[in-house]
Amino acid sequence: MHMADALLSPTVGGALWAGTLGAIIYSAKKLKEKMDEKMIPLMGVLGAFIFVGQMINFTIPGTGSSGHIGGGMLLAILLGPYAAFLVVASVLTIQALFFADGGLLALGANIWNLGIYPCFIGYPLIYRALVKKDKSAKRIIIASVLSVVVGLQLGAFSVILETKLSGITELPFNTFLLIMQPIHLAIGLVEGFVTAGIVNYVRNLRPDIIEDLEGVNGLSSGRSLKKLVIVMAILTVITGGAFSWFASTHPDGLEWTIEKIYGKPEIPEKKNPITENLSKFQGKTAVLPDYSFPAKEEAGKQPSWPAVDAGTSFSGLVGGIMVLVLVVIFGLGIKIIRRYKEKT
Amino acid sequence: MTFDTEYFNIGYLDSLSYKDTFVHRIDPRVKLIVTFIFILVVVSFPKYELSSLMPFFVYPVFLLTAGDVPIRAIAKKVLFISPFAIFIGIFNPLLDTKVMVTVLGIPITGGWISFFSIIVKFILTVSTALLLIAVTSFPGICEALERLKLPRIFVIQLLFLYRYLFVLLKETLRMVRARDARSFGKRGKEIKTFIRLISVLLLRTLEKAERIYQAMLSRGFRGEIRVSKRHRLKYHDIIFAIFSISIFFLFRNFDVVDYIGEILNRSFR
Amino acid sequence: MSHHIVELKDVYFHYPDRTEALKGISFKILHGESVGIAGANGAGKTTLLLNLNGHLLPTEGEISIGEVPLCKKTRQEIRKKVGFVFQRTDDQLFMPTVYEDVAFGPVNLGLTEAKVDERVRNALEMVGCLHLSSRPPHRLSEGQKKAVAIATVMAMNPDILVMDEPASNLDPKSRRQLINLLRGFEHTKIIASHDLDLILDVCERCIIIKEGRVVADGYTEEILSNETLLEENNLELPLSRQYLHIKQPF
């Protein structure tokens, strides 16, 4: 599932972009070291393949609804983790630009959610481990399903975390969790089967191609990969740790974390809700825009947000409409100017 | 969206990006950065801000009109993706029921305000992202990314994907049409058929990669591809950048809307 | 003069799965000759062409291009002299714009930016596509793509032009333009095609391949009038020859 800009706060979005860019730079570096030059056209065309493959729908047995593949795991199997990650990133980038799938700020989060887990956790830790000794069709199915499911579960969970940390939507954490995880479990099962089906089919028809690819992607279970896997495992633990953090009803802990991220010089007394400190007035004088903190719905309190009060709200409404009208006039003005220029 | 419509959509936006207007001629780096900042600023608004978001429409409207982009193209896409935003945002009015404001005698809860705030942010960010690609050719964006120091392998990957996307789309369109012609309702769209279809496509793709590699070798390819740098930063690019970003910060930090509203209020009393 | 000779001496080739595609092919092509290669499907035309460019290497026998014997070490050098135009243009045009595609070869030759620009412009001029230089390939018609594909190869100043089914997928007008273009080239040309009328128009010499062997090698005029020979090879008289005897109007 894709994240959207409107649900992200700049901090969370920015943090994930930083992570994703780091991963892209790292993967590019790693790839350059042991890349066969043949990879360049191969990655490009496979990217197009996944892109197109995602556009083809099939019916999910039992439900009657239609679904489509993600493809991260298939790419990892064909290309190795580094190349696959870059390909996933490229597919999502083009989708974000041409389809507005999610948005440009959320792109960082999406590449992370849909790329890191299958390529750097699912594939190396689960798929390869299971397929190492036994490459039978059956084993491939099991390995594929397991790795895809895990990848998707982690991805779905990340979406929930990111939404929660951004605090834009009131969607309760638990509800979101209860919706996302089972759905992605089902999606994962299906995609796992489909991926295995494709791999087995291609292997049967053209075993030379698969072998060829395994040579080309130059993946060796060398020390560097082990290091990466350890780093990824640690990250997963941290993510899990954050989960238990939230599960506890200690909103102070959340505020404290956010404050640290945000970098405010002073930490107010823990008794006061942070929201009261961040008034609109401060927002005006700050050089960098502020953003609001999530409401503490666990405590059942309503946010004491003074931002909108009866008096100013009416002028806000009127002003808002006026501004929209002005913008439309502006737009029409430009159109007229352009048409005039074209005629001369 | 069906395969057909998605196929034509990409092609359409892509063809728009090769027009020649003032906006198209702005350096792609500038457009990329300005758009990104725009999104950041819009998204940085607190939960309950609604009216202050309105002035921001001036940027997408500018891109749309000065860039000669037909509004239908953008509006259709935004509408199509909106259910997702609505689905996520709808919890706000359901859960946040404290009345924040009364307008013309109608009480409005915080939940609804934040809901519409999400919707407006959504419209702003999505339309602007689409407009970015509508007024900037994709190779232009790739050039900008490389100049902004993104790894070359990744940029080349984007360019190759883009190049062969249209080729594969055409091929797959044929296959999908053939499949649809022989499937009636749900039959034929089963997973098994899908796996076969996609596996064949995969094999063809792999063979194509082989041929492209051969073609590259036959023209002396030795592992390095250069991304051509066609754009040079000009004064008007920089002025555009400074101007836009300043306006965004202006709208973010000063309640222009309120101000205008107050003026109107007073002048009508 | 001699550095433009293409010579095949008893060339055999079989694929990894043991299919024999070429079974003892020998011929010699001189500088400036225009040779058409015809034959049934699966006769070995494409395989032969791919051997000329070093994409495939003979399993037996020898190929020399301009007195340089073809082998793994020399094929990069040979590719600078032999320009290969593939059947599917999409395989050949892989850069974001026409200009960059045509520049790809010269850039890889290590030329300076100015020189590259000169080569690109000349090549595009030659095929009449200079005005398309900033277009992306997917916004070209098949005919334009074919012309640009030829330009990508011409920009490397090859001595020999090898083409695999150049006119397939072209509409009649583009096909005619292609034929005129080819007739204007002075390079040595080796063209594999089912389009016998094209071979008739462009090549003065014709070689017919059957089951990996040369079964005819001579003047196009003669070979493509030999109905028995043509039928044996799943070919027909060129269309322009078929109704010669009908002269009366309706």
Image: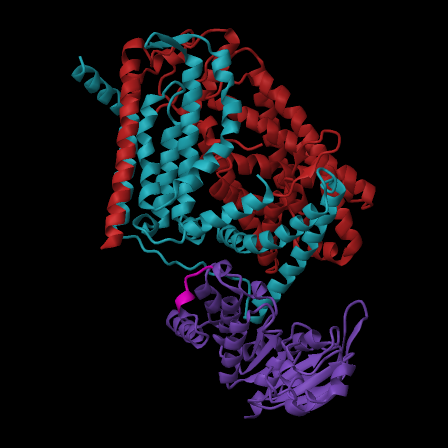
Chain colours: A red, B cyan, C purple
Q: Quadrant of the C terminus of chain B?
A: top left
Q: Is residue C223 above or below residue B174?
A: below
Image x and y of residue C171, in percent: 55, 69
**For residue C135: magenta?**
yes
Query: Which residue is farthest front?
Result: C250
Q: State whether the magenta stretch is mostly helix, strand or loop.
A: loop
**For residue A136: magenta?**
no
Q: Which residues are magenta?
A: C131-136
Residue at 38% across, 21% down? B46
Left or right of C128, for residue B198: right
Is residue C224 shown to the viewer in this render? yes
Is residue A289 shown to the viewer in this render? no
* Foreground pick, C116 / A251: C116
Image x and y of residue C121, in percent: 40, 72
Residue at 60% across, 63% down? B212
Image x and y of residue B55, in percent: 30, 29
Q: Is residue B11 above or below residue C172?
A: above
Q: Quadrant of the N terminus of chain B?
A: top right
* Foreground pick, B195 / B221: B195
